Amino acid sequence: MNKINKPIEWLRNNIHRDIRREFAWNNLPKIMYFISKILYFTCTNRFHISNYAKEQNFIACLWHGNFLMMPYLYAKVRKKPNMSFITSAHNDGIIIEKYFHSFGLQAIRGSTGIDKGGTKALITAIRALKNGQDVAVTPDGPRGPYKSIANGILLMGIKSGIGICPCKISPKRYWELNTWDKFCIPKPFTSIDYYIGEPLFLSPTINLEEARNKLRESMQAIDL
């Protein structure tokens, strides 16, 4: 009896898992889009954008827990979307990809680390930058550690010569989820400050640790 029940239980668990996954893929991006719209239109939004980002293409650098309202910041930079966002090659990347597609943004599936299937994503991103596109990266994604900086964005800046602009969405009142990235959701009717800071240019001869320290300083400066 146990031998019969085990495969049935395995099948039931896997079917339930697949149903949950399909539900998440199909519905979470729509829910996120709906919530973000409500937040944007009920909050007081203030934008602080560097002239560099307005005048030419750039690499947007923001922490993974801060991406929910990023499309609204980008909409103030470009009337016509021209950005690719690097998303995880894992299943959760599908949710983020569909969410950003809702705003007309494209996805580059991969990783911010060159040792996690990110080499192809890096090549695609550099090609996009050289073709005049903007590229957004969460250097601590997709799995952390929190506010760490993987090599991908550093190599992107070094190889392309394009400036890396630190970005931040800073709501006055917000919920912080109990996730590794401390995902931030603004509360309705609060005020939100959106920032794109001055660019960081990385020399072709700079070593990765020095580049990492410079980008960390740039991100910390906009966090103040």
Image: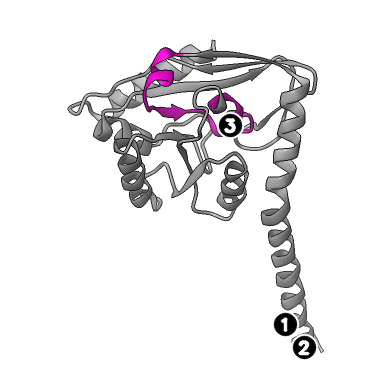
Q: Which amino acid type is shown beneath numbered disc 2? A: Ile
Considering the numbered disc 2 on the image, is that residue within a helix, a strand or a loop? Answer: helix
Q: What SS does tag 3 mark?
A: helix
Which residue appears farthest toward the front when viewing the image?
79
Q: Quick check: can you spot residue 114?
A: no
Decide: few, some or many residues near mark 2? Use Cα within 10 Å; few <14, some 14-19, many ≥20.
few
Nearest-to-viewer mark from 3 and 1: 3
- Quadrant where the image shows the C terminus: top right
Residue 118 drawn at (x, y percent): 38, 48
Q: Which residues are magenta?
A: 50-74
- Residue 211 at least partly seen: yes
In the displayed orientation, state which residue is furthest to the left: 205
Relative side of 11 to 149, left or right: right
Q: Earlier in the sequence, mark 2 or mark 3?
A: 2
List x then y, in percent, for residue 106: 49, 44
Residue to which mark 3 is pinned: 71
Badge 3 crowding class, 10 Å Cα cut-off, few under 14, some 14 to 19, many 20 or more, is: some
Q: Nearer the viewer, residue 218 or 105?
A: 105
Q: CA distance from mark 2 to mark 3?
A: 51 Å
Q: Examine the structure image and report whether residue 17 is included in the region drawn in magenta.
A: no
- Position above or below: 143 against 209: below
Q: In the drawing, what numbered circle is on residue 7?
A: 1
What residue lies at 46% left-to-right and 31% top-to-bottom?
Answer: 148
- Residue 43 coordinates in the image, percent (x, y): 75, 19
Note whether 159 is above or below 101 in the view shown: above
> Where residue 4 is drawn, which disc sits there?
2
Whether the magenta-drawn stretch holds residue 65 is answered as: yes
Q: Nearer the viewer, mark 2 or mark 3?
A: 3
Q: Say whether marks 3 and 1 touch (CB < 8 Å).
A: no
Please name whichever residue, 11 or 33, is drawn nearer the observer in this view of the structure.
Answer: 33
Image check: 99 left or right of 13?
A: left
Asked whether the beta carbons under mark 2 and mark 3 sit within 8 Å of each other, the answer is no
